[in-house]
Amino acid sequence: MKKWILLINLLLSSQLYAAVYDSPEIFMNVDITHPHFSISLPSNPTTGYSWTLKKYNDKLYELMTHQFHPSKPKLIGAGGKTVFVFEVLKGVTLPKRSTFEFFYARPWEPQNGRTQKVIITFQKGLNTAAPVLEQ
């Protein structure tokens, strides 16, 4: 009986993880006092899939870089995350919220891709560190 309960719990927890991973929207809070902020999305380029930035307000932000960071320890075929680093343009007034839209697909199979919206809320005094820009 314990084995069945464990199996059911395991199956339900994996469904919960899948629901969170496949959520069409991610909400983030960003400290308004930092000139840079980053958005991290789970990815696995060994499958051929990659993230593309589709929509954002380029009058407020500039995409500085985007890089894949493998999980640790580095294993063949293992996933990681793709990190997009943005800079707030000088002299702009930031809105309270801003939406960024990404697309995760294989370049040769865009019909099988998925859209991910990231909604940023800007706040003061979050005590968060600014992202480190890697060269």
Image (spheres, helix red, strand yellow):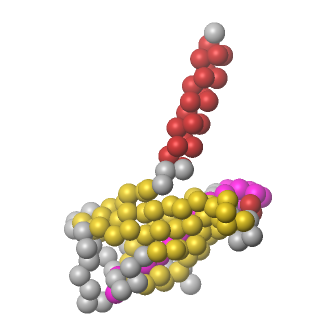
Q: Quadrant of residue 107?
A: bottom right
> Residue 128 lies in magenta, yes or no?
no
User: 67 or 19: which is nearer to us?
Assistant: 19
Relative placement, left or right, of 32 versus 129 is: left
Q: Could you tell me residue 59's position as x and y percent?
A: 36, 86
Relative placement, left or right, of 10 versus 109 is: left
Q: Vertically, is 133 above or below 96?
A: below
Q: Residue at x 67, y 67 (%)?
A: 110
User: 91 or 34: which is nearer to us?
Assistant: 91
Q: Could you tell me residue 89's position as x and y percent?
A: 34, 87
Q: Residue at x 51, y 61 (%)?
A: 116
Q: Vertically, is 36 above or below 26?
A: below
Q: Could you tell me residue 20's position as x and y percent?
A: 50, 46
Q: Residue at x 38, y 63 (%)?
A: 119
Residue with the most extreme front position: 111
Q: Quadrant of residue 81?
A: bottom right
**Do we see residue 78 in this rendering?**
yes
Quarter of the C terminus within the rendering: bottom right
User: 123 or 16: which is nearer to us?
Assistant: 16
Q: Could you tell me residue 102's position as x and y percent?
A: 52, 68
Residue with the most extreme bottom position: 91
> Residue 79 lies in magenta, yes or no?
yes
Relative placement, left or right, of 72 versus 28 is: right
Residue with the most extreme top position: 1
Quarter of the N terminus within the rendering: top right
Q: Vertically, is 1 above or below 49?
A: above
**Do we see residue 131 in this rendering?**
no
Residues drawn in magenta: 73-89
Disc tally is 0
Q: Vertically, is 122 above or below 1?
A: below
